[in-house]
Amino acid sequence: MVRAAWAHSFALRSAHMRVVSCNSFGPVSDLTVEHRPSVPVGPGQVRIRVTAAGVNFVDGLFVQGLYQIKPPVPFVPGGEVAGVVAEVGDGVTTHSVGDRVFCSTGLGGFASEVVWPARRVTHTPAGMTDGQAATFVQSYGTAWFALHHRARAHAGEWLLVLGAGGGVGLAAVDVGHAMGLHVIAAASSQEKRSIASAHGAEAEIDTSTEDVKSRAKELSGGGVHLVYDPVGGALAEAGLRSLRDDGQLLVVGFAAGEIPKLPANQILLRNRRVTGVDWGGWVGGHQEENQQLLSDVVAAIDRGDLHPVEPKAYALADVAVALQDQLDRKVVGKSVLVP
């Protein structure tokens, strides 16, 4: 009876919701926080009261119109959220009001509430905070997909992670370590390299002062088997040249803002491979396989094999600051908006 009364009172309060709106492509400082009518809950859907919305580098690219896919404006950025189920639609038997949950939304996550299909909403493990739940899906989903599915990495191999102190790179360090790989963390600051080492990296490279290729070959005894590259730019070629024969460069993203032009002779002469890692694109046509992937990640977290970081929190009104910090690569680990 108490739960029903609480749900009813919440429904009355949530006639409107707060959202971050991108009304035109441009600098993140142009974003506005607006009040909009709540979206009705349909059959098979749940309403989630958002307690944390993950902030990712790609969100800033969407807002600026720099991502490969440009959504029609206006739109609400934000691709992953965690919170509490506030309302369930007809036919939903897997979730109840009050359940702690998380989900990936693609867009629409920077809001005080979201409505999403119940089959794509996962219960948050008891040992995970809402901040962790709102920030691990994209980074750990990408890393798991890259190392397990695309690279099919084996224990004992050497993995060089570029941008190892950011959210995506740090997840790769964590997943690689859990798989039994020898992980080398490459990052520009000691703070970022230290957090990577705390997550399992056994060696570090200072990308601001050291030659990445030479140092990686020295540390790995002749060259690494795998390079995980969410950075792009000049570091991509350095990563490629760090590979041993038959090594593999995993292209994850271009946080440096520059799509690299790689020398094809370095691929040909050493039988190296360049492999694309578009986890988000893969998810669209592999919903069931992706649910299993996420289940595997959550199980690894529950076992204590993986250790998502607790993110830095920003108020929803400070969305421009949170995104600019991501774009300027000031964030160590992850960050969230708190509506």
Image (cartoon, rainbow, N blue to C red):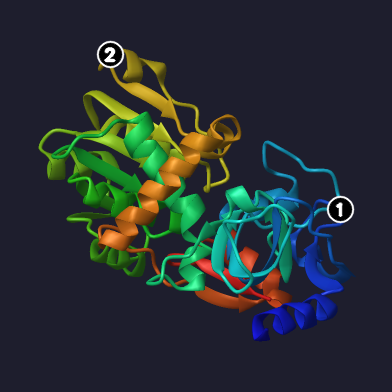
Q: Nearer the viewer, residue 292 or 322?
A: 292
Query: Which residue is at a point 51% across and 41% down the rendered structure image?
Result: 253
Q: Which residue is at the far left? A: 221
Q: Residues within 10 Å of mark 1 (few under 14, many from 20)?
A: few
Q: Which residue is mark 1?
A: 74
Residue 54 pos. (x, y %)? 57, 63
Look at the image and tell me in which quarter the N terminus lies: bottom right
Q: Nearer the viewer, mark 1 or mark 2?
A: 1
Can you give x and y, in whole percent of width and height, for residue 248 in the image? 31, 28
Q: Does residue 157 appear to the left or right of 29 in the view shown?
A: left
Q: Return the x and y of residue 289 as percentages of the image width and height.
A: 47, 35
For this orientation, the residue located farthest to the bottom is 2
Q: Which quadrant of the figure has residue 242?
A: top left
Q: Is residue 311 above or below residue 199?
A: below
Kindly tell me whether residue 229 is visible in this rendering.
no
Q: Identify the secondary structure beneath mark 2.
A: loop
Q: Mark 1 to mark 2: distance in Å?
A: 48 Å
- Give the residue drawn at x 39%, y 68%: 309
Q: Amino acid at mark 1?
A: Pro
Q: Is residue 16 above or below residue 327?
A: below
Image quadrant assignment for residue 328: bottom right
Quadrant for the C terminus in the image: bottom right
Q: Which residue is mark 2?
A: 269
Is residue 12 in view from this perspective? yes
